[in-house]
Image: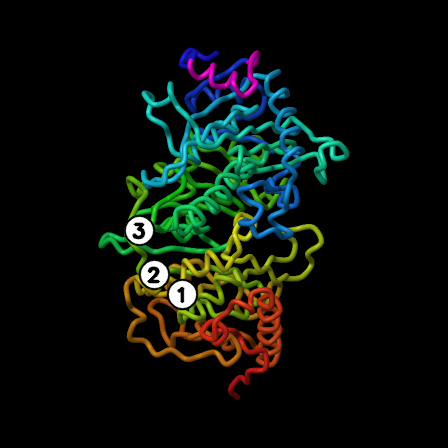
Amino acid sequence: MSPNGTQESAHRLASLGFTKCKMHLHSLPEQLVEDTIRNGQGVLSDTGAICVMTGKFTGRAPKDRFIVKDSITENAVDWNAINMPFAVEDFNSLKKQVVAYLDEKEVYVKALSACADPDHKLKIRLIAEYPWSAHFADNMFLPTAPEEKQNFTPEWTILCAPGFYANPEVDHTPRKNFAILSFEQKTIIIGGTGYTGEIKKGIFSVLNFVLPHQRNVLSMHCSANVGQDGDTAIFFGLSGTGKTTLSADPDRFLIGDDEHGWSDNGVFNFEGGCYAKCIDLSEEKEPEIYRAIRHGAILENIVFKEGTREPDYADDSITPNTRVSYPIDHIDNALEGSMAGHPTNIFFLTCDSFGVLPPISKLTPGQAMYHFISGYTAKVAGTEEGIDEPETTFSACFGAPFMPLHPTEYAQMLGRQMRDHKVNIWLINTGWTGGAYGVGSRIKLRYTRAMISAALLGELDQVHFSEHPILKLNIPAACPNVPDELLNPINTWSDKEAYVTQARDLAKAFAKNFEAFADMATPEIMAGAPIPDGNMPG
């Protein structure tokens, strides 16, 4: 047991079945870095960040994530291809095996919490096989005061055992790896994968059930920041659309980069850190994130430049999903307390690799609900095995893999909050213009930042907007520091007929995806849907 451990904590762990493992209780991040290096599991970069390899899995494995079907979840969870049920007896058997496996190891125990709002704090205990898994949790969750650790009583426990593999024939898992949530036992078990995002997203899934279903608080897959005058902005978006990049604004205070709640008091961060993509990272493009990669940060699946310890952020030979986690205070303008008021502006971020969507458009409340339920983005060719052309992706509420409830429950809560607080809603395309991926070009980050800045400063309030005949989106005629021709996407295409065809195809994809939600959609929501047979002028 580590010197800063306690007999009280050991006793509590013994009640879970841990009787002989060597426990490292509440180790400091520096100790976890030392143990990672001692174990041969990581090396230091030239910035002082610890660099680790997560193994076979360099991203989440959504097809291996389950929710135990029990008395709490049976009639509440939206069971589908994402929220897949797992039997109580199989969970109990697998949990027992994981505990027995970890009990033969050195384990790292952390007492942490989620939710910056003290009214909704969730106490978390992590028991991890690897020191860098515990370090990741240190970065991503909120700390517990030293005097609270001795009698710490967690609400949820995470058992993280990357080296343990299930037997699919016996344990009834599809593969050897798994991430399973039990709401009755308030336990998450993770095995067969070292990807740290499973820890983070496991707790996010818990909060996406508990807060809306039991506490009437909207949980959101979004980043958030606040201006000098207290105006809060929220950025929804799937991975790769720019949530972390666009919320790290040197002129605004960062609330958080990925997971938030929206209660009657305002917006609050679930986490204590950031988990950013590193592919093609540069100080010029993303200075706040680049400078956050120092001692205390964890780089995942990064390759060094030959003969150095300098990370090569352009190298995707291991994965395009290279990542860094760091405490939020590594961002100079992080908001102390990670709580702010109700939002003035909400941005839906999408990376449209078809080059169809305008770079910025203003949404009506009905359109906002339609696009929130749709959760559109597009995967780019070459980023995943088997994808040779841009591919449409719809993820309800911009976070379907983490949403245990039916999407309409989150959408209805968002709709109430938007109306109650008179929020401006914007759709931002961070993807392509002038043609699809391979033909057109990526919208420059400086233009995206300029458009968001204009919206935040109210500089678009008096600008004329025109409605796109197919997409039904309201496009501004002008925006400060952005070329006018960029604002209407058809103007950037040399082949106008090809643009119209692509726009109609995307509208059809929206309509096809929305069939699953049409029964609950109001006329106002459906009026905001794209029209595949709409006629473009000229």
Label placed on residue 146 = none
Residue at 62%, 63% in the rendered image: 438
Please tell me whether mark 2 sits on a helix, a strand or a loop: strand
**273 in magenta:** no
Label placed on residue 345 = 2
Amino acid type shown at disc 2: Asn
The location of residue 231, given as percent across then percent down, is 27, 56
The foreground one among 391 and 75 is: 75
Front: mark 2 or 3: 3
Question: Start and end of the magenta stretch?
Answer: 8-21
Front: mark 1 or 3: 3
* Colour setting: rainbow
Q: Residue furthest right?
A: 169
Please tell me whether mark 3 sits on a helix, a strand or a loop: strand
Amino acid type shown at disc 1: Trp
Q: Earlier in the sequence, mark 1 or mark 2?
A: 2
**11 in magenta:** yes
Q: Tag 3: Cα neighbours inside 10 Å, few (<14), some, or many (≥20)?
A: some
Amino acid type shown at disc 3: Gly
Query: From the viewer's perspective, is 477 left or right of 525?
Result: left
Q: Which residue is mark 3?
A: 266
Q: Which residue is mark 1?
A: 426
Above or below residue 536? Residue 120 is above
Q: Earlier in the sequence, mark 1 or mark 3?
A: 3
Q: Are marks 2 and 3 in contact (CB under 8 Å)?
A: no
